[in-house]
Image: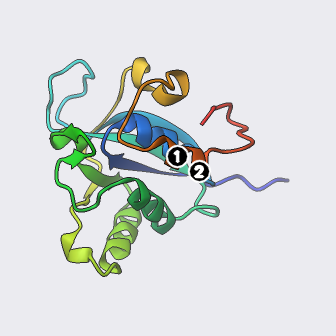
Amino acid sequence: MEAEQVVEEIYLAGGCLWGVQAFIATLPGVTFTEAGRANGTSECIDSDYDGYAECVRTRFDPSVMGVGQLMAYLFEIIDPYSVNQQGPELGPKYRTGVYSNKQAHLDQARVFIAARDDARRIAVEVLPLANYVRSAEEHQDRLARCPEDSCHLPAELLDKYRKKDDSAGRSW
């Protein structure tokens, strides 16, 4: 009998979610990504800005990729010192953050940040997930469907991590 795969879930915010989703989907051990909004106050995707951060719901196999490793990858694509801005995207919805319903994930993210020489300058929030709303279909896997669209992540960085053989069928 085959052992059941353990999958955990974390929510990563790094500015415009299009590029973050395209990047996170390429990582080893990541089994699912979904564009969404974390820690707003509304359950509705059609509501005005309600305090949310654009994020990527990320399911991963912890035997392949741990929270510390996910953090290291996230820090490759964000400016961890910037408050409410990533690249040209400006405003609180573009803040950086790590959100989870699992305290161990939050603890591991805090340990990763605390171990850095620049820990005092880091502006990445690490908070329990209070609310999550899936983004509209037009935002799901946007860069895979519309490669001419742009985001704050350089195409070269996305190219560096694209999976050669993607069994999930994604082109990123």
Quarter of the image for the C terminus: give it. top right
The correct choice, above or below, for 98 with respect to 104 in the image is above
Q: Position of residue 14 (x, y in %)?
A: 33, 48
Element on which disc 1 rests? helix
Q: Which residue is mark 2?
A: 160
- The picture quadrant where one finds residue 108 is bottom left
The correct choice, above or below, for 40 with respect to 142 in the image is below
Query: Can I make out residue 26 in this image?
Result: no
Left or right of 139 in this view: 87? left
Query: Can I make out residue 114 in this image?
Result: yes
| Label disc, if present, on residue 116 of the rendered structure | none
The front one of 122 and 107 is 122
Q: Position of residue 120 (x, y in %)?
A: 19, 75
The reply to whether callout 1 and callout 2 are in contact (CB within 8 Å) is yes
Q: Position of residue 158 (x, y in %)?
A: 53, 44
| Label disc, if present, on residue 156 of the rendered structure | 1
The correct choice, above or below, for 152 with respect to 125 in the image is above
* Label 2 Cα neighbours within 10 Å, binned few <14 / some 14-19 / many ≥20: few
The front one of 115 and 172 is 172
* Label 1 Cα neighbours within 10 Å, binned few <14 / some 14-19 / many ≥20: few
